[in-house]
Amino acid sequence: MSLALDLFSIAAISAGVFFFLAGTVGLLRFPDALSRLHALTKADNLGLGLIVLGLLPRAESLLAALMLVAIWALVQLAGATAAQLIGRAVRRKGPAI
Amino acid sequence: MSSATLAGLVGAALVGLGLYGVIADPQPLRKILAFNLIGSGVFLVFGIVARKGAAAGLSADPVPQAMVITGIVVAFAASALAVALTLRLFEETGRATLRPDAGTKPPDDGADAE
Amino acid sequence: MSVLQALDVGLAFLVFAVAAWTVFAPGPFAATVGYVVYGLLLSLVWIRLFAVDVALTEAAIGSGVTGVLLIGAAARLRGAETTPAEEALTGLTRLFAAGLCLLVAAALAAVVLLLPDQGPTLAPQSMERLPETGLGNPVTAVLIAFRSFDTMLEKVVLVLGVVGVWSLAADRYWGGAPGEARAERPEPTLAFFAQVLAPIGILVGVHVFWVGADEPGGAFQGGAILAAMWMIVMMARLTEAPQASAFWLRLALIAGPAVFLAAGVAGAVVAGGFFAYPPGLAKPLILFIETFMTFTIAVTLPMLVAGPPRREPRR
């Protein structure tokens, strides 16, 4: 049982790291601000979500697990807001930024 | 090399880097940034002192840690004052430069005249 | 080399590279963003040094609140970015400065390498006296009990910082409010974010303060989170900064150091020593002092970020 959980953790965290990597490559390589934002928010939220999912079986208590999920939810909220604000600034001032 | 020594070496490098920024960069805001780099480098050197003082079941000496926490807060207060001074200089003169002979523009509409 | 060591080396290079970026970046705004990233990476280094309390403080104040302050300043200084060429150092002076800085860094590195493996330490004394304070976190015990005088004076520095910043206001704005006025129709995205986040953040801030007695956390970290919540509500322009002349604000600014000092003086009378806590009452007294300190930090940091008053006082 613990082996299965370990394998699950490794698989989920590896997948999460892959999404982080993809998001970072997108941030560095995409041509304009909006597509960079797209790469960052989508990939990062999914990446962090998978890492949290992988860490859940390793949490010491139910409270610790809930805290991990809360962190993920708060990052979602902050990421979505920041992306919205940057996107609006780009639309207002043109894509030159 | 232990991770503590490595962190101490990074601290030493940060002090050098920050010092160069303070000396070489003419913009006040960049000087404040560089000054903060020096500060955090010194804190890291303090951190390795704490780590080397691990004893009595603790992985680091709590006294230097507490002093670093105090230091971070004081560094913030100093940065805030420095930023306020820079912004006021910019409002007064229209420039943000530390050169003593830099020209001053007349105050806006005399509104700010003391 | 183990995986952890490889990660340490990678982290060290990353911290150094981002620090170099903040010094050599093309524009002040890019440099400032680099500094925020640098602060977050630095808190990872602090975790590797087993100093979780410091890591929390660095992330919250060193990176977060300082970041807001500097990014705001960089945005307002946008017109002043161009630097006349004559202000930059010439080639030879620059080289000389670089050499000197290298020398300082090398000397410090030598000191770091020459440190004995087991240095002098106050950890045994701290642990020995820890039960008397009733606390479980030795760092909090050092801050509020063993070296309480330092911590009290540091709060005084924060208050002096606010006085210094306010003193830079133009005469006609003296006593007025800093920052932006409250908006009739605030930016909807930011307003939504502030409304959702603020209640959660206040809960997290109080939690971090409360667990600080026994686990990593405490007045500084919790206060900084509370301060961030007030700042974000002001940034969303759902509310505006109070007038500098407001009586409650001035009371809030000095509440922390004043209660701390009063407890210290009371200790001289009751417990036989300046800043001595009477045995048995130490923990409630420490929590009482910490509550006021958290409150003062939560009020002071946003006032330092908001800057000097920029609007005429309402009478």
Image (cartoon, coloured by chain):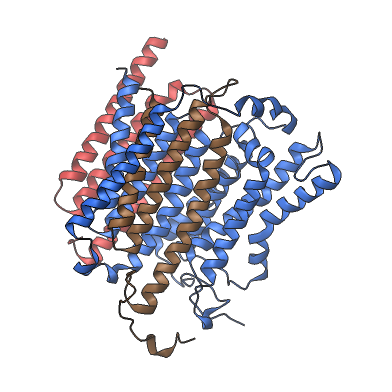
Chain colours: A red, B brown, C blue
Residue lying furthest bottom in this view? B110
Residue C39 lies, in percent from the top left, at 39, 44
Quadrant of residue C6 in the image? top left
**Can residue C166 be seen?**
yes
Q: Residue at x 57, y 57 (%)?
A: C158
Q: Which residue is drawn at 31% across and 74% down?
A: B95
Residue C75 lies, in percent from the top left, at 33, 65
Compare residues C240 and B64 and report the one nearer the observer.
B64
Q: In this view, does C307 lie to the left or right of C80?
A: right
**Can residue A83 be seen?**
no
Quadrant of residue A95 in the image? bottom left
Position of residue C251 relative to residue A79, above or below, is below
Position of residue B24 relative to residue A76, above or below, is below
Position of residue C127 relative to residue C108, above or below, is above
Q: Is residue B37 left or right of residue C169?
A: left
Q: Residue at x 58, y 35 (%)?
A: B63
Quarter containing the N terminus of chain C? top left
Residue B14 lies, in percent from the top left, at 34, 43
Residue C78 lies, in percent from the top left, at 29, 68
